[in-house]
Image (cartoon, grey):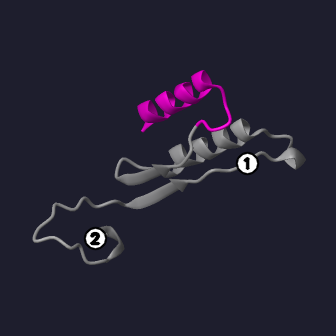
């Protein structure tokens, strides 16, 4: 809340400062581009890694959805290692 300039309903708080907020929301497949939902998700994750810094808040929604469990776990593991 404080990072957005809103009041924090607390007597005191330790508020981290983020230089940016990077959001990756769910995206479906794109038959016109010939890309599956997993391929688009990989493109989104690459964009997140390019845009995020060590002081960014990274929010990911439905990472690995529509893939095999092993592929989703591998993607999440690599993303955490890179961040």
Q: Bin the neighbour count of mark 1 within 10 Å (Cα to Cα): few under 14, some 14-19, many 20 and up.
A: some
Determine whether the residue tagged by mark 1 lies in a helix, strand or loop: loop
Question: Are the residues flagged by discs 2 and 1 in contact, CB closer than 8 Å?
Answer: no
**Residue sitting nearer the eye, 9 or 6:** 9
Residue of label 2: 2
Classify residue 14 as left or right of residue 35: left
The furthest residue to the top? 70
Task: Give the mark, 2 or 1, whose residue is nearer the N terminus.
Answer: 2
Observer-side mark, 2 or 1, equals 1
Classify residue 66 as left or right of residue 72: right
Residue 63 placement (x, y as % from top left): 56, 40
Residue of label 1: 28
Classify residue 22 as left or right of residue 69: left
Determine whether the residue tagged by mark 2 lies in a helix, strand or loop: helix
**Residue sitting nearer the eye, 47 or 27:** 27
Residue 1 placement (x, y as % from top left): 31, 69
**Residue sitting nearer the eye, 80 or 9:** 9
Which segment is the magenta one? 64-83
Quadrant in which the C terminus is drawn: top left
Verify whether residue 19 appears in magenta.
no
Disc tally is 2
């Amino acid at each position: 809340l404080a990072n957005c300039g809103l009041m924090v309903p607390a007597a005191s708080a330790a508020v981290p400062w983020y230089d940016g907020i990077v959001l990756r929301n769910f995206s479906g497949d794109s038959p016109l581009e010939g890309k599956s939902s997993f391929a688009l998700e990989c493109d989104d994750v690459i964009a997140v890694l390019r845009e995020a810094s060590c002081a960014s808040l990274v929010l990911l929604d439905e990472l690995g959805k529509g893939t095999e469990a092993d592929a989703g776990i591998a993607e999440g593991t690599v993303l955490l290692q890179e961040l």
